[in-house]
Image: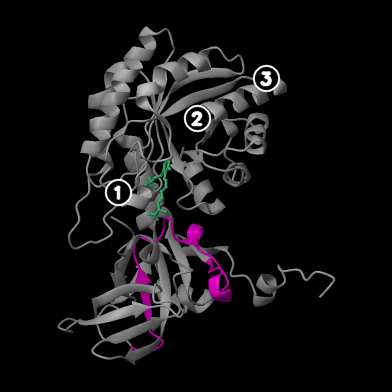
Amino acid sequence: MDHFLYRDGALFAEDVAIAEIAAAVGTPFYVYSTATLLRHFRAFDEALEGMDHLVCYAMKANSNQAVLKTLAQAGAGMDVVSGGEYRRARAAGVPGDRIVFSGVGKTRDEIRLALEGGIRQFNVESEPEMIILDAIAQELGVVAPITVRVNPDVDAKTHAKIATGKSENKFGIPIARAREVYAMAATMKGLDVIGIDVHIGSQLTDLTPYEQAYQKVAELTQTLRDDGHTITRLDLGGGLGIPYERSNADPPLPSDYGAMVKRTLGHLDCEIEIEPGRLIAGNAGLMVSEVIYVKSGEGRDFLIIDGAMNDLIRPAMYDAHHDIIPVIEPAAGIEPQPIDIVGPVCESGDTFAKQRLMPPLAAGDLVAFRSAGAYGAVMASEYNSRPLIPEVLVKDDQFAVIRARPTFDEMINRDTIPEWL
Ligand code: LLP
């Protein structure tokens, strides 16, 4: 459930009319609902009740500091994957001991930054990373808490570009080699091995692959304990999917996921960490866009809108479906017609939907893309010299611009001309 509903025929974000925001900030823009963000965070937090746990929001999904602060104030930790994300989380007031550092390619500078600034743990993904981390920790005179990310070789049954738990993927170390890697880590004075990390992919709509992976983690926990390691924390990754298509989807709920975690791992008496991104932010956001033209083509019509693939890349990149709804609710009995919904960018890939059933729309009308709160604004670019679109946060009847649209001058003046020109 989210807080984007029609009231008297007009779409609202909580208690604010979308049309009012559009009039204030112009289109296109992203808008997020505080109540929905908190609702989704709490759903996870409550699903793990009874187990020592921390929900570390995967901030790659939406890293606006206002979003981070909203979640951090509710008790969330953060999962970061770059020095930029670490800095952003700290700037939003998240203490180091609630930040987990994931990712296959942490640089020396990023490692140093986190060790100096404070970190809950590094999720280490390879032996070379382990060696560098150990060396830097010793150089700084600190001990780095780590888990090792294991690759359980399970098929997450999701889009190939966002599956991470098969042996062919670049992530983690093969679970079959875990014992030797943990043995190596135990000899390193700069490291404190505290647990195991696993993440198998994103937009998972079935709990079976999770259960397979977590069973392997449970077995590995026993094996490593028998080998003499102290395993007290399990980081179970993120990835629980959301219903992108309201009409036909029913993915498992955080409560189902939590019950499965308790069933497979509860007996190990470990602290549980999870890293959800999409499920917290995805359905807490819309991208709102205005119709520029309605164009009749050969056998099909096109709704040309002012949002484009550079603003929301998911349909072009993953063939992703986003529900698109008019901001003015269609009157009862209006027959929807199929239409292609496209942006102004000069690529055929700038197509959001083909032959989507929509009520009749005209230039100037507003449409809203649902499920755009995760992997929307964060993946945007200025392709075609289109400035990044603003982000707005709603709370009850208030709204605030949380990232302003840059001016054309700001965008253009970021280039510098060498003196020989
Ligand atoms: N933890 C790790 C180590 C991850 O790599 C990811 C996502 C997450 C947590 C959060 O996964 P989530 O709960 O959001 O599914 N841009 C793609 C999604 C990429 C996900 C990458 N890793 C998309 O728009 O679908």
At label 1, the amino acid type is: Gly
Is 246 displayed left or right of 418 in the figure? left
Secondary structure state at the residue bearing disc 2: loop
- Mark 2 and mark 1 in contact (Cβ < 8 Å)? no
Bounds of the magenta span? 362-390
User: Counting other residues with Cα less than 10 Å from the Cα at mark 3, is it few (<14), some (14-19), or many (20 or more)?
Assistant: some
Which label sits on residue 241?
1
The response on whether ligand 1 sits within 8 Å of label 2 is no
Instruction: Single out the residue that lies furthest toward the left.
Output: 333
Dominant secondary-structure state across the stretch colored magenta = loop
Q: Residue at x 31, y 17 (%)?
A: 268
Q: Does the residue tagged 1 have its C-beta within 8 Å of any atom of ligand 1? A: yes
Instruction: Give whichever of discs 3 and 2 has the lower sequence position.
Output: 2
Q: Which mark is residue 138?
A: 3
The C terminus, quarter of image: bottom right
Callout 3, which amino acid?
Answer: Gln
Q: Earlier in the sequence, mark 1 or mark 2?
A: 2
User: Residue 63 at what x, y percent from top left?
Assistant: 52, 51
Report whether 384 appears left or right of 269. right
Question: Badges 1 and 3: C-beta atoms under 8 Å apart?
Answer: no
Instruction: Give the mark toward the camera: 1 or 2.
Output: 2
Say if residue 337 shows up in the picture: yes
**Residue 384 among magenta residues:** yes
Amino acid tagged 2: Ser
Q: CA distance from mark 3 to mark 2?
A: 18 Å
Drawn side of residue 47 relative to residue 194, left or right: left
Q: Residue placed at 66% from the left, 20% from the top?
A: 142
The residue that label 2 is drawn on is: 126
Instruction: Tell me the quarter of the picture where residue 191 sits.
Output: top right
Where residue 391 appears, x then y in whole percent? 51, 64
